[in-house]
């Protein structure tokens, strides 16, 4: 992990009317880091992620993502990040190959780049035999691995993963995390949310949001020390139980 | 007395001739009176098909099932009157208020909220301060509590809960399971499904379901005991390298990430050998023996 910052947030705030969804959060994320972004339902994670991915303008505070300002350069941000979520990631009625072609095309990649890299990705995922099958025919675990590979196909600096492994079987869930490790090792920064507390342990650092604020941010080991907890599950429960705001 | 839920060799297929997907392959199990029985499995395991069959909303392609002695195909009307069902997707009336939803469900079942209030009090009282709010405007946790109240208001003998905790954060999940435990103590039989392996331990018995097949049925304790192999937890500063390395070792049957540690399943139960190999590699490491849990069992059963 390097000391180069790829995300900086300083008192980043979002208010909807008189409701403060994100309340002056400050943190940095470093290049190649796997950063776990945890919080109970309604804590403000999605709003924060939408600001960082250039989809929602903040009310106050500062933030840069991949070196670009979230107020003025949000189009640049979109070009330099990847995104996948549990709910939406691939087009079910396109084939594996068509999905890759479509996303890579949207990011303006050349035909030769797409052709060369498609072969590599299919090989890596052991999907060469299924390249021309519709995505809807794939098991969920394969879909999610493919979705991740598609999200980083254009070689973004950062990839945002919103509950990428929800409902995925325990074997595929681990295979998915090996892909995350590999991406991080190649220098891509991974910003990930999850409800699985064992996955929080796979992160280099973890932040925990409570009622719109970041109440804790550290390595999993330090968090466990600080909160005298045996597992991240316990750390999470100790912090999230303090929440006074109703869940979303 | 007949068991409240009996499922015999149920088969369910979807699709036509050359694109048939078998959602349930010969699934059988029985649930006892006042038992909290869990169907544990990832998305696509067949959990929802199974719930829709036992709640008479879907016809099986083979096998039989009864609820309180009534056949799910022939006696569907009798079953619908006596069971409570909370589907995975929120399915209350969004444009009715909290109170209107509860009254609606009570009326449909020819009862009143007052008559069975004692049963839902524990849960409903938590959302009662918002009784005039439209259901569509509730938070996720509150919707879940209202849905459970509505499924309970006619005092069902069996409660079917399809993935009630999916997408719900760890705190709300814990609270929900505490509510289920109290309902069970009041004599209600509960069949509940979940993709979260760590929730298996909260059930009396569980069936592990994967791609339409039951891998194992037993108490969580017995399933864990039947694992039969030794598991070592190892960690070092480079976890990816460590994983690739231990996978190469002769005595290692399987190795996979498990939270802070990797779990290493040994072929011959000799833990010393693994420590020796790691020492030879010159790596700093921490190693300890751990008890297998349901997720270890699920992984082993999936791969066997």
Image: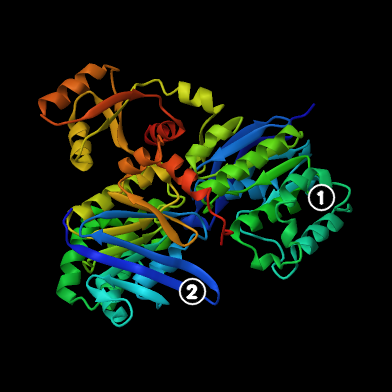
Callout 1 secondary element: helix
User: In terms of depth relative to the viewer, which is nearer, A67 or B148?
Assistant: A67
Q: Is residue A3 above or below residue B210?
A: below
Q: Is residue B66 above or below residue B146?
A: above
**Residue A161 visible in image:** yes
The mark found on residue A67 in the picture is none
Q: Residue B54 location, x and y as percent?
A: 68, 45
Say which quadrant the C terminus of chain A sits in. bottom right
Q: What is the quadrant of residue A92 in the picture?
A: bottom left
Mark 2: few, some, or many residues within 10 Å (few <14, many ≥20)?
Answer: some
| Residues tagged by mark 1 and mark 2 found on one chain of the structure | no
Q: Residue B91 location, x and y as percent?
A: 67, 61
Per the image, the residue denoted by label 2 is A15
Query: Residue at coordinates 79% horizontally, 58% vertically from top-left?
Result: B102
Q: Residue furthest bottom?
A: A72
User: In terms of depth relative to the viewer, which is nearer, B189 or B112?
Assistant: B112
Per the image, the residue denoted by label 1 is B77
Q: Is residue B286 above or below residue B269?
A: below
Query: Residue at coordinates 30% horizontally, 65% vertically from top-left?
Result: A151
Contact check, label 1 and label 2, Cβ < 8 Å: no
Query: Residue at coordinates 45% horizontally, 52% vertically from top-left?
Result: A166
User: Left of B251 or right of it: where is B148?
Assistant: right
Q: Residue A128 location, x and y as percent?
A: 25, 57
User: Left of B216 or right of it: where is B147?
Assistant: right
Mark 1: few, some, or many residues within 10 Å (few <14, many ≥20)?
Answer: few
Chain letter, disc 1 residue? B
Query: Residue at coordinates 42% horizontally, 44% vertically from top-left?
Result: A197
Q: Is residue A224 above or below residue A12?
A: above
**Residue A132 visible in image:** no
Q: Residue B242 location, x and y as percent?
A: 20, 36
């Amino acid at each position: 992990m390097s000391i180069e910052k790829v995300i900086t947030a300083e008192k980043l705030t979002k208010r909807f009317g008189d409701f403060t969804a994100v309340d002056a959060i400050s943190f940095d994320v470093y290049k190649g880091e796997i950063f776990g972004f945890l919080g109970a339902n309604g804590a403000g994670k999605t709003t924060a992620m939408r600001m960082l991915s250039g989809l929602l303008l903040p009310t106050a505070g500062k933030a840069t993502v991949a070196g670009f300002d979230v107020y003025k350069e949000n189009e640049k941000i979109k070009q330099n990040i990847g995104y996948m979520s549990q709910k939406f990631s691939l087009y079910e009625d396109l084939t594996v190959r068509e999905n890759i072609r479509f996303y890579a095309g949207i990011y303006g990649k050349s035909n030769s780049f797409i052709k060369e890299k498609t072969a590599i990705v299919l090989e890596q995922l052991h999907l060469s035999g299924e390249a021309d099958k519709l995505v809807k025919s794939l098991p969920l675990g394969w879909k999610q691995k493919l979705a991740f590979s598609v999200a980083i196909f254009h070689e973004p600096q950062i990839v945002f993963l919103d509950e990428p492994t929800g409902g995925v079987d325990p074997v595929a869930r681990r295979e998915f995390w090996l892909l995350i490790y590999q991406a991080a090792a190649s220098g891509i920064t991974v910003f990930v949310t999850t409800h699985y507390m064992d996955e929080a342990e796979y992160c280099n650092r973890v932040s925990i949001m409570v009622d719109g604020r970041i109440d804790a941010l550290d390595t999993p080991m330090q968090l466990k020390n600080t909160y005298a907890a045996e597992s991240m599950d316990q750390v999470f429960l100790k912090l999230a139980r303090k929440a006074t705001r109703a869940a979303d | 007395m007949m068991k409240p839920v009996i499922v015999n060799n149920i088969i369910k297929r979807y699709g036509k001739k050359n694109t048939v997907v078998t959602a349930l392959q010969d699934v059988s199990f029985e649930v006892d009176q006042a038992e909290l029985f869990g169907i544990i499995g990832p998305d696509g395991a067949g959990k929802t098909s199974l719930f829709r069959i036992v709640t008479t909303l879907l016809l099986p392609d083979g096998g039989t099932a009864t609820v309180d002695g009534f056949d799910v195909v022939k006696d569907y009307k009798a079953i619908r009157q006596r069971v409570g069902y909370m589907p995975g997707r929120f399915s209350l009336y969004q444009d009715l208020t909290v109170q209107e939803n509860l009254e609606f469900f009570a009326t449909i079942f020819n009862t009143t909220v007052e008559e069975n209030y004692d049963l839902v009090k524990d849960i409903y009282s938590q959302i009662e301060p918002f009784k005039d709010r439209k259901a569509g405007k509730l938070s996720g946790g509150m919707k879940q509590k209202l849905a459970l109240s509505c499924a309970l208001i006619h005092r069902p003998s069996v409660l079917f809960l399809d993935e009630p905790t999916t997408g719900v954060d760890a705190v709300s999940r814990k609270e929900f399971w505490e509510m289920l435990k109290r309902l069970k103590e009041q004599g209600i039989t509960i069949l509940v499904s979940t993709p979260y392996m760590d929730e298996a331990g909260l059930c009396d018995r569980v069936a592990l379901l994967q791609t339409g097949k039951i891998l194992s049925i037993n108490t969580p304790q017995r399933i864990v005991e039947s694992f039969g192999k030794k598991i070592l937890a190892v960690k070092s500063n480079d976890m990816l390298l460590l994983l690739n390395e231990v996978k190469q070792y002769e005595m290692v049957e399987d190795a996979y990430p498990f939270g802070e540690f990797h779990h290493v399943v040994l072929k011959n139960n000799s833990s010393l050998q693994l420590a020796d190999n790691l020492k030879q590699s010159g790596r700093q490491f921490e190693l300890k023996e751990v008890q297998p849990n349901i997720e270890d069992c699920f992984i082993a059963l999936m791969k066997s």
